[in-house]
Image (spheres, rainbow, N blue to C red):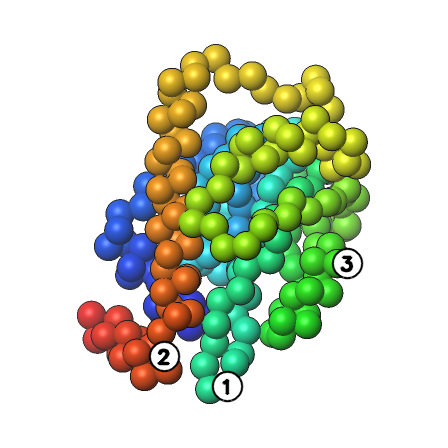
Amino acid sequence: MKVLKSILLPTLTAVSLIATNHSYANNSLLLGEGVNLIAVNGEEINSDSLFSSSTKHNLPNGLNQILVDYTAEIKKGDDFELEKTKAFVLLFESSDTKINLSAPLIERIKDLKEFEKNKNWTLKNSANQNISYKVNTIDNSGFQLSRDFEEELARFNRGNSVAALPKSKIKTPNNINNKESKNDVIKKENMAMEMLIYWYNQADLNTRKSFKELIKNK
């Protein structure tokens, strides 16, 4: 992801995205390169994992549901394009451990499609032992600048998927206005990130090279 980091990290600073963190004390979730955390236990968050080799988040002990996707650099001709997978819902249990989540190496569109089909994430604890998980995907119909993942997860959790949260674990927000305000901020952040990826992919080879040189000399 070196190309991605060199291009987008300064731009992220320029648009002043605001990170939203969850504060739990029991489990540390470490995301592998290219893995993006979208929501925890039905609540959407902002994640900057796209711009770092490893991002840490905190989760409570017990049963957790996370929504994640993966951004891959796919080589096309002499340059790379950014491709995102579908969103994956993972349901698992853990207590007092470091949790490492990673995806297999994806270098071709074929690899990405196989990953979406096989859903073969690697989830390990601090002893490097596999953590059992249940998984399913939430499909994205075409290019979208903004998605309401909380609403999509709510519909998902009302269904019969093996990765759905038990009804007893689904949270009901106490303050609708605060929830809507926070969601507006996150949607703007997610939209900015999607636009950065979109316009980079739309640029021709010379424009991409010029942009890289501009960022490098800043």
Badge 3 element: helix
- x and y percent of residue 84 in the render? 55, 59
Q: Is residue 15 visible?
A: yes
Q: Residue at x 43, y 14 (%)?
A: 175
Q: Examine the image and state in which quarter residue 21 appears.
A: top left
Q: Tell which residue pokes out farthest to the top in this image.
A: 174
What amino acid is at disc 1? Gly
Label 2 environment density (alpha carbons within 10 Å; few <14, some 14–19, many ≥20): few
- x and y percent of residue 26 in the render? 59, 31
Q: Residue at x 38, y 18 (%)?
A: 177
- Above or below: residue 109 compared with residue 37: below
- Above or below: residue 56 compared with residue 7: above
Disc with the residue nearer the chain's start (2 vs 3): 3
- Above or below: residue 46 compared with residue 157: below
- Above or below: residue 217 compared with residue 165: below
Label 3 environment density (alpha carbons within 10 Å; few <14, some 14–19, many ≥20): few
Q: Real-space Cα distance between discs 1 and 2?
A: 12 Å
Task: Return the residue at label 3.
Answer: 118
Task: Return the residue at label 2.
Answer: 204
- Nearer the observer, 6 or 150: 150
Q: Is residue 98 visible?
A: no
What amino acid is at disc 3? Asn
Task: Return the residue at label 1.
Answer: 77
Would residue 120 appear left or right of 195 to someone viewing this image? right
